[in-house]
Image: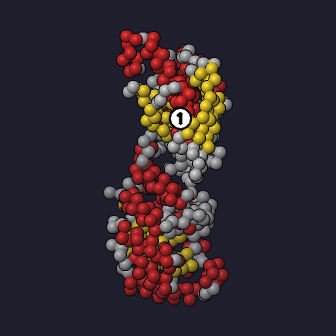
Amino acid sequence: MPETVKIFDTTLRDGEQSPGASLDRNQKVEIARALETLGVDIIEAGFPVSSPGDFEAVRAVTKAVTEPVVAGLARCQKADIKTAWQALQSARRPRIHIFLSTSPLHMKYKLKKRPEEVMRIAENMTRYACSLCQDVQFSPEDATRSELPFLAQIVETVIQAGASTINIPDTVGYTTPGEFEVLIRELYARVPSLRQIMVSVHCHNDLGMATANSLAAIRAGVRQVEGTINGLGERAGNAALEEIVMALKTRAKFYRVRTNIQTRQIVRISRLVSSATGIVVQPNKAIVGGNAFAHEAGIHQDGIIKQRLTYEIMNARDIGLKENRLVLGKHSGRHALAKRLRELGYQLEEKELQGFFERFKELADKKKEVFDEDLFALMEERTGAPKKVYSLEHVQASSGSGLVPTAAVRLLKEGQILQGSGTGDGPVDAVYKTIDALLGRQHKLTGYAIQAITGGTDAQGEVTVQLDSHGRVITGRGAHTDIIVASAKAYINALNRLAAMENVVRKIPNRRSKAVAR
């Protein structure tokens, strides 16, 4: 059976150090519980001495989870270590994680101490931490810019002092995969006792190589890797745990190791962390980005339809998504279009599809992405469906604290202008009630949903509504940068579909049930 690589998550400590990513105690507890469900082996809950709030958050995490080891960070100072231990005492499996700079640059300018002084502090503080807790991890900060003989010597010293895990951090993301693998192998060669304990790595992403460096260390024999969800962290962030885990899973024959991670929880916790920190995951982010399993290019879509493995090395379901996503745009091909049309209930012959594809391409050249409502409209053009009964000419709504939500609407009904105003429980409700009043009939709204089509403050929103008419469910969609306008367009779109359906029923009175079923 393959060896297991332990996953050390530092989202709650190093990840929280991302500018603007502060987490309160309740958020830390919620994320910690999600990390436990994900299957991480160690949770670094915080830096207890840094603030009373962080101390309490670490203590709360120790009470919230039972399976993972819970670690608290501390400098090689007695006060730090003592405070960390106090915060960790409720943990079922506590770990004190201490660190001390070892590079010439850090020792001279940050610590202002000679190498022999640093060596003595490392040994004494490791012994002190071990007197409080059986599980102590030591990190020589800025290890990848440290001199190898000194690094090996201090590692040997803290192992003899009782450290059970040695973490080799690439603190500023300076190293490269080849260099890092050589460094790890050299340390194993120079410090034989490393083979008897756990060796970890902690890589930053300043040059974009954090994941690659972590994987190189695993190839060199390391069996614990540190990182964060979504790659959060100081500056350019840490190694993204989801990338490391899925690399090991996808290339299992190459790495010959496994993890304890329940990968189908990845998307859920990625979104939880994004929501809690307010840091949005970029669309092209590996594994959890919105485009990671999306395909627009026609060649790719054709390959995906025929055999998913042609352009996907991972299954979307393995990270918690339901399926991949074929994006219809100007680069899409006929196979992707035909597949989406079939999903919408349309089956076209080859010649019909070619003509429809040409119209689709014309539209796609004008829009970034073609949505289902666009396909419905194109299909209605092709089939000679009845012209729209209702058109939205104008809509305006106002609301606010202490104000009654009001709306003004102007519609065009088969050439006749209908306009009026009304009130409601909110601006959208006011718009819908005004439309109903203008048409002289009420409609039962059974569903209303909004989703952003694009990003940014000027994002276009798509509204989907469902109306119930005598047991028939009619769906309408509308898109606009103004959500009130999008809501009105969706409602009018549903009413037009309802009118078309009722027209069919009137023309075929003896086959009402079949018409409705269709």
> At which x and y percent is residue 454?
60, 43
Quadrant location of the N terminus in the rendered image: bottom left
> At which x and y percent is residue 372?
53, 30
Looking at the picture, does residue 224 appear above or below residue 59? Answer: above
Q: What colour scheme governs how the chains and residues are painted in the rendered image of this protein?
A: secondary structure
The image shows a total of numbered marks equal to 1
Residue drawn at x 58%, y 32% is 489
Quadrant location of the C terminus in the rendered image: top left
Viewer-proximal residue, 343 or 432?
Answer: 432
Tell me the amino acid under the disc marked 1: Tyr
Instruction: Name the image quarter holding residue 39.
Output: bottom left
Looking at the picture, does residue 95 appear above or below residue 387? Answer: below
Instruction: Name the image quarter holding residue 317.
Output: top left
Give neighbour class at mark 1: few <14, some 14-19, many 20+ (Cα, 10 Å). many
Taking the image as shown, residue 99 lies to the left or right of residue 30, namely right
> At which x and y percent is residue 129?
42, 83
Q: Is residue 168 visible?
A: yes
Viewer-proximal residue, 253 or 299?
Answer: 299
Looking at the picture, does residue 85 appear above or below residue 427? Answer: below
Helix, strand or loop at mark 1 = helix
Instruction: Name the image quarter holding residue 85.
Output: bottom left
> At which x and y percent is residue 394?
65, 32
Residue drawn at x 38%, y 27% is 471
Viewer-proximal residue, 428 or 480?
Answer: 428
Residue drawn at x 59%, y 64% is 20
Q: Is residue 460 visible?
A: no
Viewer-proximal residue, 281 or 7?
Answer: 281
Find disc 1 in the rendering and name its residue: 432
Looking at the picture, does residue 265 appear above or below residue 168? Answer: above
